[in-house]
């Protein structure tokens, strides 16, 4: 009977620990989302901004080269 109680206590501790961990993860994620501190969204936004900046620079470079080739003056 004592061994059964020890095993049951260990299982209950594991289940409660897991539940609390997952609940806190969700709560923490929700708080970060509300406060605008979601690291995934922040990283995606930064990467997208960098990609648009590179695209803009490439467009300016190719536009400038094409204009010089055809003798067109740009703004």
Image: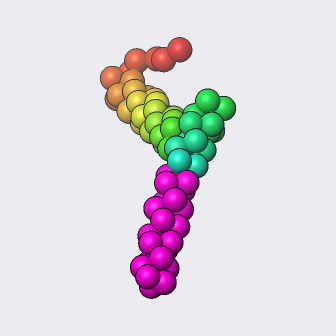
- View extreme (front): residue: 1
Residue 13 at what x, y percent from top left?
A: 52, 67
Of 45 and 61, which appears nearest the observer? 45
Residue 63 is at least partly visible in this image: yes
Of 22 and 13, which appears nearest the observer? 13
In this rendering, position of residue 64 left or right of residue 21: left
Of 12 and 46, which appears nearest the observer? 12
Total of numbered circles in the picture? Answer: 0
Residue 46 at what x, y percent from top left?
A: 54, 40
User: Which quadrant: the N terminus?
Assistant: bottom left
Specify the color scheme.
rainbow
Relative to 10, is 70 above or below?
above
| Residue at 48 percent of width and 17 percent of height | 74
- View extreme (bottom): residue: 3
Of 12 and 56, which appears nearest the observer? 12
Residue 48 at what x, y percent from top left?
A: 46, 36
Residue 39 is at least partly visible in this image: no
Q: What secondary structure is the magenta-colored segment mainly?
A: helix
Was residue 48 drawn as part of the magenta stretch in this picture? no
Was residue 19 drawn as part of the magenta stretch in this picture? yes
Relative to 29, is 66 above or below?
above
| Residue at 53 percent of width and 14 percent of height | 75
Residue 67 at what x, y percent from top left?
A: 39, 24
- View extreme (top): residue: 75
| Residue at 48 percent of width and 84 percent of height | 2
Relative to 28, is 64 above or below?
above
| Residue at 52 percent of width and 44 percent of height | 26
- Give the residues in magenta: 1-22
């Amino acid at each position: 009977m004592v061994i059964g109680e020890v095993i049951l206590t260990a299982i209950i501790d594991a289940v409660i620990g897991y539940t609390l961990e997952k609940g806190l993860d969700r709560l923490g994620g929700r708080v970060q989302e509300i406060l605008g501190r979601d690291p995934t969204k922040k990283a995606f936004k930064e990467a997208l901004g960098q990609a648009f900046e590179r695209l803009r620079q490439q467009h300016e470079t190719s536009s400038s080269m094409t204009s010089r080739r055809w003798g067109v003056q740009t703004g």
